[in-house]
Amino acid sequence: LLPSPLGRPRQLGIRARASSLPAPLRGGRPAFDVLLREAHRRNLRVVLDGVFNHASRGFFQFNDILENEAASPYLDWFKVNSFPMNAYWGKPGYTAWADLAALPEFNHANPQVRRYIMDVARYWVEQGIDGWRLDVPFCFGDDAFWQEFRAVVKTANPEAYITGEIPWDATRWMQGDQFDGVMNYLLTYACWGFFGGGNLDWDLIGHWAREDHGGLWIKPGAEAFAASVTNLLERYPTPNVRAQLNLLDSHDTARVISIFKGDKAAFKLAETFIFTYPGAPCIYYGNEIGLEGGRDPDCRRAFPWDERRWDRDLRGYLQKLAAIRAAHPALRDGGFKVLHAAGDAVVYLRSLGAERVVVALNRGQGSAALTLDLSAELEAACTLRELLTGGE
């Protein structure tokens, strides 16, 4: 469970305010403690959103600089270039994330800043959270910082999960000394290309189609899709592959059901793949009941609590996928092998010990008949059971 936002600041609530979170608007600390306790009682783990690249204008240390300028003891906490700092009008006199004056960037070369962030990371893990999702960790090129961050978090809880927001190749961060996994956007792009086929809303995809993001991965053919998803398993160490956060959309993209122009069948097929591929399947809130949404901020709509507006068929389908994954270790921890990829059809095998799960996905509008020789993969005279329907 990754609840976000929890902090005080406006907009998405992802500006660093240290131990001030969660905000009173969201129930304050008492409500958060109840959430954590009840989640753990249900065998759920809670991961918080960590924004350690930048702060907000409401951050105490930054406010002190605004008031005292060069005399502030916190002057070196940020990258101040000139006075006045123009935090609310004009061009800011400091380095700000994406040139947004509301988001001053930390000076991570300052030992006090590093210690402060490490203390925040340690504090919340010691309070019982189960990990961190790191916002824009690629914005400052300091591997030593994230290596120290990992050491601090894992010392507090060796089982804590660390995942980073990396929208492109993440090899640098996944060598066993920084992140456990990343938001697997390369997989996202591949899923858009194959399952959306020729029915993608490119306007909603927007900048994600650039070559430095998903442009080279959004491809329609089964062969290209199979090559992409196999490549992603081979480029990272196995422990990292198993810890990948596999998503179809997020708070930064249009919702996948909208990218697919409302094609519910394509959405179901993509979710089937996510739940049967190595890594951790991620459901963006509302996807389970068919919530639509365009580009940011439309993709961050309030959840519709009126159950009459829910797509119950879709919700039931995702519940079934989750149950199937939970019941079959091969889908969680097994090997992955493509058995067939051509046209609109992809077939692959998940295997662990004696368990075999064959997954067949057909993106086409009609049925597809395939003849596959599985003698090398399955025991002789075995019976295959259809997991979605229970048939044989």
Image: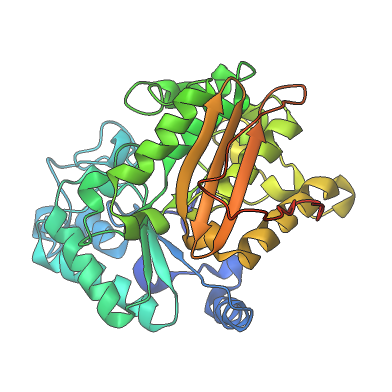
Q: Nearer the viewer, residue 311 or 370?
A: 370
Query: Seen in the image, is 109 located left or right of residue 115?
Result: left
Q: Is residue 61 above or below residue 167?
A: below
Q: Nearer the viewer, residue 370 or 200?
A: 370
Q: Quadrant of the N terminus?
A: bottom right
Q: Nearer the viewer, residue 314 or 100?
A: 314
Q: Which color scheme is applied? A: rainbow
Query: Seen in the image, is 71 located left or right of residue 133?
Result: left
Name which residue lies at 78% across and 46% down.
314
Q: Is residue 205 above or below residue 54?
A: above
Q: Nearer the viewer, residue 91 or 273?
A: 273
Q: Is residue 351 above or below residue 127?
A: above
Q: Position of residue 297 (x, y in %)?
A: 57, 37
State which quadrant residue 64 falls in: bottom left
Q: Position of residue 287 (x, y in %)?
A: 68, 46
Name which residue lies at 49% across and 62% down.
352
Q: Position of residue 326 (x, y in %)?
A: 62, 65
Q: Position of residue 209 (x, y in %)?
A: 44, 22
